[in-house]
Image (cartoon, rainbow, N blue to C red):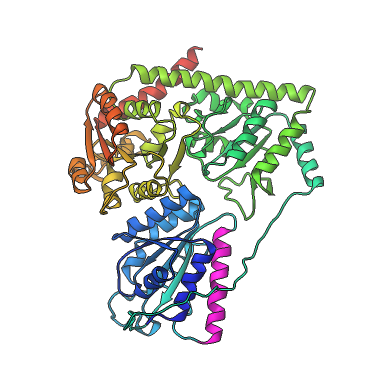
Amino acid sequence: MIPSSIFHLAIFCKEVGITEFIVSPGSRSAPIVLALNRIGGINLIPVFDERSAGFIALGKSLASQKAVGLVCTSGTAVLNYGPAIAEAFYQNVPLFVITADRPPELIDQNEGQAIRQDHVFNAHTKFSAIFPSLDETLESKIFARRILKQAWFEANQFPKGPIHINVPLREPLYPESEMEFDAQPFNFSLIENTRELDRYQVSGLIESWNQAGKKLIIVGNMPPDPDLRNALKALSEYGEVPVIGDIINNLIGFDGLIQHVDSFPKSFWSDENNTPDLIITLGNGLLSKALKNFIKTRNIKNHWHIQPAGFPADPYGTITKLIHANPEKVITRIGEGAFFQTGALKSVQSDYCKLWQETEENTKRLVYQFLEESSWSDLKAVGLLMENIPDNACLFLGNSMSVRYANWFPSKLKRENLIFSNRGTSGIDGCISTAVGIAMSKPEKQIICLVGDISFFYDRNGVWMDKVPSNLKIVVLNNGGGNIFRIIPGSSAMPELESYFEMDQVFSVERSALDSKMEYFCAGNTSEFSSLLKELLASPKPSIMECRTDKYQNAEIVKNLKHWINQENQQN
């Protein structure tokens, strides 16, 4: 039978708006799946592979900015959610993870699919609990209500994140006859927590801002936020403040945005005169190692971080002021106050802004000049792809070299383009599945997924389904495997490079496309890529473009790009 507490769980999810669940097959989870299905109003999406299911839920939540649910059976099935939960934790995505379990008397007793599931994801969830589903007492129902309210509160308090509810269930697991169920309201009230700066505190921030000399705003990984983007644009223009970051900050498309920092010459980063007196950071992690090292090694006296609540990541121990507030409102108020700054400090800030902007323009010119003259390679393919992204498309960037290549060519993107990437944990294990989830949630947009061959083959189960979304276009950089280890310092010089790091693979992208009923294209040079890319983007079917490149030439071209930029700046 289905315990009443399981119906309460289902009703709660529906009432708070978790109306999409990715469910994987299994007997122990049957009562949960049946309850979610029978109350109506909840869309259940079956996915066979729990690891892919986790990343598909992640992609759907990233794209919709809403909590998405997961349900699986007991045992090792649960452990396969681990990579997606870790990614959601570091990317602040509110997944609602529900796992069925054996009752406690069967754990460690050689029972099939009975493992130690309680709090198994503690390190990477904001909240975890054992659901009181084994008896029908009033106390258990009250406890169930409290757990669900706390789980929802924690999942949605900044920083958002995944929660895990483990549900032990005894047999029988299936109703003997058709159950009639009249869905009753859960009768809960959610806890809200609002914190705003008062007028006195805002005035103090503006005064401190205006008294600082060289100021800089650094924006890390974050979802699209049009209001914040407009506030940063205004502060950049009228306050002459450099706004910098990576392609993953979704600030594409306003004049003055500093986007090419990952390609800046060494001479810029080594100049102590470029050290700011005050920086403001927003969002999550950064991609550029040069920028991260800049923050880490400079003696920056004032580092403010703005987020609505919670304690921030402070990887370098440089934060001197934590501002708990809506970032857009604080940036707007600072911009309004900075507009009236006059005198010598305003001149200092103006010169500092010009320094960043001139370096940006010069670096951008050199990068695209190099791209124009370079031969066929991963870098060439990504540069051409970035120049041809449709206006209204979403770009999902795989990890390792894929996101780094794209980070060298951000200025060709349009304001309407949305950027997604699993940069919470930066793993390669769920890129395809996450892109599938995004494609499901945004059927009106074309989703272009750029990944390397190892990422693709590792997660090709993400397209193991009856019908892959037709708006999904996957571009695979096939260089034979693990090319990043030939590019980054350290591993590239190791004699064990080819044996233990690159992991040469011989799998077929074409056969994978055939297995998933996806249209297949293959480019082996610049001319083929340019021609086939048009066909890929115009195709009404889910499609894969394989770009076959040479790993030795890829590494040499990246090395040459960096050398070219540094050499040209030395001459100038």
Q: Is residue 394 above or below residue 375?
A: below
Q: Nearer the viewer, residue 178 or 421?
A: 178
Query: Residue 157 placed where, x, y %?
Result: 59, 58
Q: Is residue 570 left or right of residue 466?
A: right
Query: What's the residue at 46%, 53% (across, down)?
Result: 61
Residue 142 in the magenta stretch? The answer is: yes
The location of residue 232, given as percent across then percent down, is 63, 34
Residue drawn at the location 78% of the way across and 46% of the way down: 201
Is residue 25 rendered to the left or right of residue 86?
left
Q: Is residue 305 visible?
A: no
Query: Is 130 on the left-hand or right-hand side of 533?
Result: right
Splitting the image into 4 quarters, where does residue 121 fall? bottom left
Position in image of residue 278 (x %, y %)? 68, 35
Determine if residue 432 is in view: yes
Q: Quadrant of residue 145?
A: bottom right
Residue at image point 59% right, 36% down: 229
Which residue is painted at 54% across and 67% down in the image? Answer: 151
Give yes or no for residue 506 being in the magenta stretch: no
Residue 24 % position (x, y): 32, 64
- What count of labels does the image hold? 0
Name the main secondary structure of what is drawn in magenta.
Answer: helix
Between 130 and 228, which is closer to the camera in this rendering?
228
Q: Is residue 380 above or below residue 319?
A: above
Classify 285 as above or below 27: above
In magenta, the rendered stretch is: 137-156
